[in-house]
Image: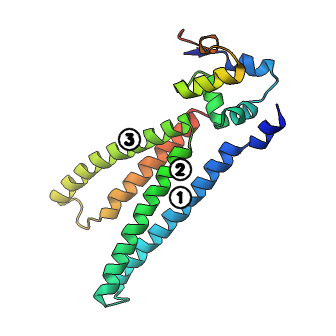
Amino acid sequence: MKNRLKVLRAERDWTQADLANELDVSRQTINAIEKMKFDPSLPLAFKCARLFNMPIEEIFSDEV
Amino acid sequence: MTETTKERCSTYDSRAARENIKLVVWVFVWTAAFVISDKAKKFGWWSEEWIAIASIVVTGALGLWMIHCYRRLLSSMDDLQRKIQLDGLSMALGISLVGTVLYSLLVTWGYIVDEEVTDIMLLMCVSYSASVVYGTLKYR
């Protein structure tokens, strides 16, 4: 699953640690999601959507 | 980032660290209780039966509390950390199962004469730890 987390984070000038703290997860988790090594759960994806104020499908896409 | 966000900074890490420390402490206490109870029997530190039974009950109770602490640690973790733990646990279970069967065969055929249940426990701990370390490095 592809995602735009890195781009959205960079636009806000946030570090991985900043985003991790916003989402209440570890920095390792953010890194793994950004590198597409790990797909987030639905609740975490919703949290991301709420944080960036965007629909989930604009952050995560099903493309490989 | 807002001030509120900064206040929340490292909330996850500090919570995970706190639960980790609690678990380590209780693992240590449980292990100590087990070792004391085991050595007491071997070296005859106490002979009264009620003390022996009490030490077994205490070791069991501490073990249950340790499991409770581990469950709390798991529930405090995020998705990825839980996945790493699940991988570690499944690896430990699989290796222990296969290892126990092989071990019993080695005992049956006489290649191991001094069998100890702690050998299986050690195998379980090593496979769990190795898998968790591997998972942590994989998703680093």
Q: Residue at x 59, y 11 (%)?
A: A57
Disc 1 residue type?
Leu
- Of helix, strand and loop, which one carries label 1? helix
Contact (Cβ within 8 Å) of mark 2 with mark 3: no
Front residue of B77 and A2 = B77
Q: Residue at x 49, y 56 (%)?
A: B69
Residue B73 numbered tag:
2
Q: Name the N-terminal-most of marks 2 and 3.
A: 2
Gap in Å between the C-alphas at discs 3 and 1? 20 Å
Tag 3: Cα neighbours inside 10 Å, few (<14), some, or many (≥20)? some
Residue on which the image places disc 3: B90
Residue B42 is at least partly visible in this image: no
Dot 3: chain letter: B
x and y percentages locating residue A23 in the rendered image: 67, 32
x and y percentages locating residue A33 in the rendered image: 61, 25
Disc 3 residue type?
Ser
Dot 1: chain letter: B
Residue on which the image places disc 1: B23
Indicate whether B113 appears above or below A23: below
